[in-house]
Structure formats: structure tokens, C-alpha cells
Image (cartoon, rainbow, N blue to C red):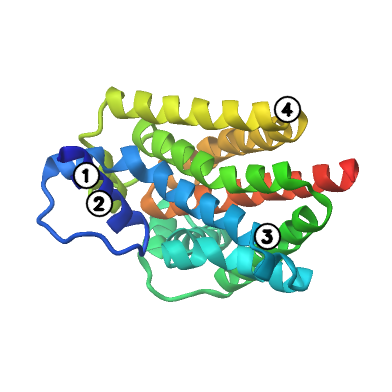
Amino acid sequence: MNIFRWLSVSFSLYSKIPMPHFEWNEDDMRHSLIFFPFVGLVIGALTYFINIIPAVSGLPLFVRSIITLLIPLIITGGFHLDGYMDTTDALKSYRPVEEKLRILKDPHIGAFAVIGLATVLLIMCASMGVILEYGDGRKIILLAMIYPVSRALSGILAISLKKAKADGMLAGETESAGAGIVITLTVQLAAFIAFMVCLDLIAAAAAVCGILLFVIFYINMTKKQFGGVTGDTAGYFVTVSELTACLILAVVSLLSA
């Protein structure tokens, strides 16, 4: 029964998919990250199956790209994009660390957040269009697998890295998460990557390497700019890692067409 509680809490936190209502306890919160990648699996499954349905596959490419782009936004309610926008505003402020952390909590939207959002959506939409047009079925599956991979990595980093705020949402979710949860997420991540590599070695390796390079950048950036990670920077990670992998898959699809 605990597994179903943890699954329900995870989907309630990280998606808009309706879940049974019950009172959460500390154990539920501690284990919720275990199923965070499963939200990505749902997004990925919908991404794949929507694009093989004849009623959708026969639509103009631009329409298919927008539908594909909207799937994660609908499932998550834009949860991670919100963190990306807040982080972008803070980074572009070029203020001291304390001021950047204050900007993360500011509910107002700045100009740089809007510009960053438009840039991400346009690049994602264009990249998805290239994958759908020039990539084969395997590339679409790789696109689908980006979502659980980004969430598995996000969970690992959220638990492992220093928190910028001791009283933040991320700190509350991860403070009691132990090595066992990190190991579980790592096993899931290894399984996702192994599946991708078996499917298409070159494309998968390129996408995974791109994400891992971004991991290095993210660790250094959060340490220098914020003094650690927050819930908003976690959203930034999910968004940019998915953007990076999608863009790489688009380039590989073009080169192999």
C-alpha cells in the first residue's frame, strides 16, 4: 500500500493527473521522488503514441509539433517552466546571491523570463518538428525517453547537492531522502539510458552526453549563482536538459536523414 501512496504523492506533486486524496505523512514525502521519473514515462508514452495515431500523423508537421510540445505542458501544468522562468529572471539580474534568491520567490514575471520562455518553446517546437519530419520511429522513442531521464537526474541532483535555502520547498521534500532513494533513481536512470542505447547507439549517446555536460554546468552554476539548488533551479534543470537533448536529437536526425 505504501508504494501506491508514494506514487500518488509523486504524481500529485509533479503532475496534474488526478490522484486519490489522503493525508500525506513524512514517509510519503520522503519517497515521492522515487516515482518522479514515472511522470516522465507517462509524458513520453503519450508523446510516442500520439505521433503514431493516424489521425495525428496525417496532420501538418507544424500542428504535430505543437501537439507534441503541449503534451508535457498539459501533464505538468507548466510546473517546471515556472521554475525555469524564475531562475532565468534571477540569473539575468546579475545581483548578489541574496538578491537572486529573493527574485526566485518573487511572484511577478520579469522581461527576461518571458524572453527565456519564448526562446525555449520556439527551439523545442522547431526541434520536435525536425525529429518528426526527418527522424524514424526510433528517434521519436528517444524523444519520449528524454522526459524520464531528465526527471531521474533532477531527483538525484536535488537530493545530492547543497540546498540554497534550508526552509525552501526542495529542502522540505529532500531533507529526509536517503542514499536508498538516490540508488533507486540511479538504477532507473541506468535502465532508461541502456534502453536508449540499445535502440539507437549514436543518437542516444549524443543526447545523453549533451545532458551530462549540462549537469556539470548546472552544478557549477547553482553553486556560484545561488549557493545551492532550489525548487526553481530544479525546474530550470528539467527544462534545459530536455531542450538540450531534443536539440541534439534534431541535429542527429538531420545528419542521418
Disc 4 packing (10 Å; few <14; some 14–19; many ≥20): few
Amino acid found under the numbered disc labelled 1: Phe
What residue is rendered at 54% in x and 64% in y?
Answer: 71
The answer to the question of whether label 3 and label 1 lie on touching residues, with beta carbons closer than 8 A, is no
What secondary structure is marked by label 2?
helix
Alpha-carbon span between mark 1 and mark 4:
35 Å
Q: Residues within 10 Å of mark 3 (few under 14, many from 20)?
A: many
Front residue of this view, candidates 46 and 93: 46
Q: Which residue is mark 4?
A: 201
Q: Which residue is mark 2?
A: 8
Q: Is residue 165 above or below residue 22?
A: above
Q: How far across and down, in percent of the image, does residue 2 sit?
A: 16, 39
- Please, which residue is most extreme toward the front here? 54
Looking at marks 4 and 3 on the same chain, the residue that comes earlier in the sequence is marked by 3
Q: Residue at x 78, y 46 (%)?
A: 136
Which element carries disc 3, helix, strand or loop? helix
Find residue 128 and report its horizontal and vertical position in percent. 71, 58
The residue that label 1 is drawn on is: 4
Kindly report the distance in space between the C-alpha atoms of the residues bearing marks 2 and 4: 34 Å
Q: CA distance from mark 2 to mark 3?
A: 29 Å
Q: Earlier in the sequence, mark 2 or mark 3?
A: 2
Where residue 78 appears, as percent x and y from the top left, is: 46, 66
Which dot, 2 or 3, sits closer to the camera?
2
Q: Nearer the viewer, mark 3 or mark 1?
A: 1
